[in-house]
Image (spheres, rainbow, N blue to C red):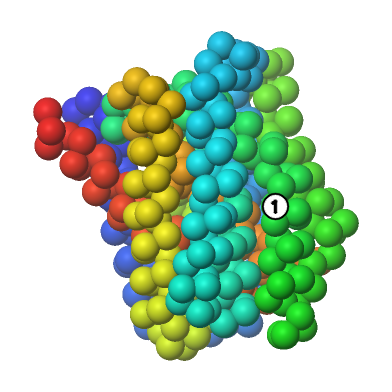
C-alpha cells in the first residue's frame, strides 16, 4: 500500500470511528458529558494540533513566501478574504439567527486546518505550499480573526447580547496557537529526533481528536443541532462548494500550475474547526457552545467534500 493510499484509508477509518464514537456517546450512560465544560477538552486539543503543526515546520516553509509569492498570495486571498465574504453572503441569504451567523463567520475566518497537507498529498498537490499556507494563515489570523469577529458581533451580536472581548481573544490565540507553534518549531530545530517521534504520534491523534471533540459537542447540543441542521447544513454545504469553486477559479486566473491549484482548493476549503470551537466555547470569549455548532457541521462536511474532490481527481487519471 502506498503512502497516499495509507493516508486515505486512515482518513476514512477516522470518519468511521467518529460515527461509532458518536453513536456510543449517544446511547451510553455517560451523562457527565452533558455537564462537562467542553473548554477543558477543546483547548488541549487545539494546543496539541498547533504544536504538531510547529513540528512540521522549518525555515524553508517561510522562505517559500518569497520564492513563490503568487501562489501564497492567491491562497491567502482565498482563505482570508473570499471565504469570510461568501460566509457573510450565505448568512444573509439563509437569514441565519444571530448566534449561527456569528458561528458561520467564525469558522470562515479561521486559518487552514492542520490536516490539509495530508489531503494535498492525496490529491497529488503541492505539499510544501500547503504547509506554508497553513503556517502563514495560522499566524495572520491571530490578528484578522479579532477584526472580522469584532465587526460580526457589532452587526449581529447586539440583538442577542453577544459581545467580543478583543483582548481576551488575542491573548487566547497567542497562548493556544502562536506559543505551541513556536515551541514545535524550536523542538524540531533543537531536538530533531524527539520531534520526529512526537510528530509521528500526534499526526495520528490529531484527526481522531477533532472528531471526538465534534462527537462530544453533538451530544451536548443534540437538540439544537437537530432542530437547525437543515438550514445550517445547507448553508455550510453551499459555503464550502462555492468556496472551493472560487478557489479553483482564482487559481486559474493567477496562472498557477495544476499541483498549486489543487492545494489552493484544499487550503481554502479546510478550516481549523478546533480554533473556532475554542473561541466559541471559551469562558473568556463567547462562552456559548451554540456558536460552535456551524464549526462542528463544517468540520464534518469539509472532509466529505474534500474526499470527494480527491476521488474526482483520481478518476481523471
Residue position for label 1: 145
* Residue 7 position by quadrant: top left
Q: Is residue 258 left or right of residue 56?
A: left
Name the residue located 38 percent from the left edge and 23 percent from the top edge: 255
* Residue 24 position by quadrant: bottom left
* Total tally of numbered discs in the picture: 1
Q: Quadrant of the N terminus?
A: top left
Please state the horizontal and vertical placement of residue 159, each as a whole percent of the image.
72, 85
* Residue 281 position by quadrant: bottom right
Name the residue located 36 percent from the left edge and 30 percent from the top edge: 252
Please state the horizontal and vertical placement of residue 4, each as a whole percent of the image.
27, 30
Instruction: Indicate whether 18 appears above or below 204.
Output: below
Q: In this view, does 143 lie to the left or right of 212?
A: right
Q: Which of 297 and 231 is in front in this view?
A: 231
Q: Is mark 1 on a helix, strand or loop?
A: helix
Please state the horizontal and vertical placement of residue 50, each as a whole percent of the image.
63, 40
Q: In which quarter of the image is the C terminus?
A: top left
Q: Which of 136 and 84 is in front in this view?
A: 84
Instruction: Residue at the far right: name it.
Output: 167
Q: Which of 302 and 86 is in front in this view?
A: 86
Name the residue located 46 percent from the left edge and 73 percent from the top edge: 93
Amino acid at each position: 500500500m502506498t503512502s497516499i493510499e495509507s493516508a486515505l484509508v486512515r482518513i476514512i477509518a477516522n470518519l468511521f470511528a467518529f460515527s461509532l464514537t458518536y453513536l456510543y456517546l449517544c446511547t451510553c450512560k455517560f451523562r457527565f458529558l452533558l455537564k462537562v465544560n467542553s473548554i477543558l477538552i477543546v483547548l488541549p486539543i487545539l494546543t496539541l494540533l498547533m504544536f504538531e503543526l510547529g513540528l512540521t515546520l522549518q525555515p524553508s516553509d517561510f522562505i517559500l513566501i518569497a520564492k513563490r509569492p503568487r501562489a501564497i498570495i492567491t491562497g491567502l486571498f482565498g482563505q482570508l478574504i473570499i471565504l469570510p465574504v461568501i460566509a457573510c453572503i450565505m448568512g444573509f441569504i439563509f437569514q441565519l439567527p444571530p448566534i449561527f451567523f456569528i458561528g458561520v463567520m467564525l469558522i470562515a475566518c479561521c486559518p487552514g486546518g492542520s490536516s490539509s497537507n495530508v489531503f494535498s498529498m492525496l490529491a497529488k498537490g503541492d505539499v510544501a505550499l500547503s504547509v506554508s499556507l497553513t503556517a502563514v494563515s495560522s499566524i495572520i489570523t491571530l490578528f484578522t480573526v479579532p477584526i472580522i469577529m469584532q465587526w460580526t458581533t457589532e452587526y449581529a451580536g447586539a440583538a442577542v447580547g453577544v459581545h467580543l472581548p478583543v483582548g481576551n481573544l488575542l491573548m487566547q490565540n497567542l497562548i493556544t496557537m502562536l506559543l505551541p507553534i513556536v515551541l514545535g518549531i524550536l523542538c524540531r530545530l533543537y531536538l530533531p529526533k524527539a520531534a520526529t517521534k512526537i510528530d509521528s504520534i500526534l499526526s495520528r491523534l490529531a484527526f481522531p481528536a477533532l472528531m471526538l471533540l465534534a462527537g462530544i459537542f453533538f451530544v451536548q447540543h443534540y437538540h439544537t443541532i437537530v432542530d437547525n441542521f437543515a438550514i445550517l447544513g445547507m448553508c455550510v454545504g453551499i459555503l464550502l462548494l462555492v468556496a472551493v469553486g472560487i478557489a479553483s477559479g482564482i487559481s486559474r486566473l493567477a496562472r498557477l500550475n495544476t499541483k498549486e491549484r489543487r492545494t489552493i482548493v484544499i487550503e481554502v476549503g479546510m478550516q481549523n474547526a478546533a480554533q473556532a470551537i475554542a473561541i466559541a466555547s471559551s469562558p473568556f470569549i463567547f462562552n456559548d457552545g451554540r456558536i460552535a455548532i456551524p464549526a462542528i457541521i463544517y468540520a464534518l462536511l469539509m472532509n466529505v467534500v474534500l474526499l470527494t474532490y480527491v476521488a474526482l481527481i483520481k478518476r481523471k487519471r
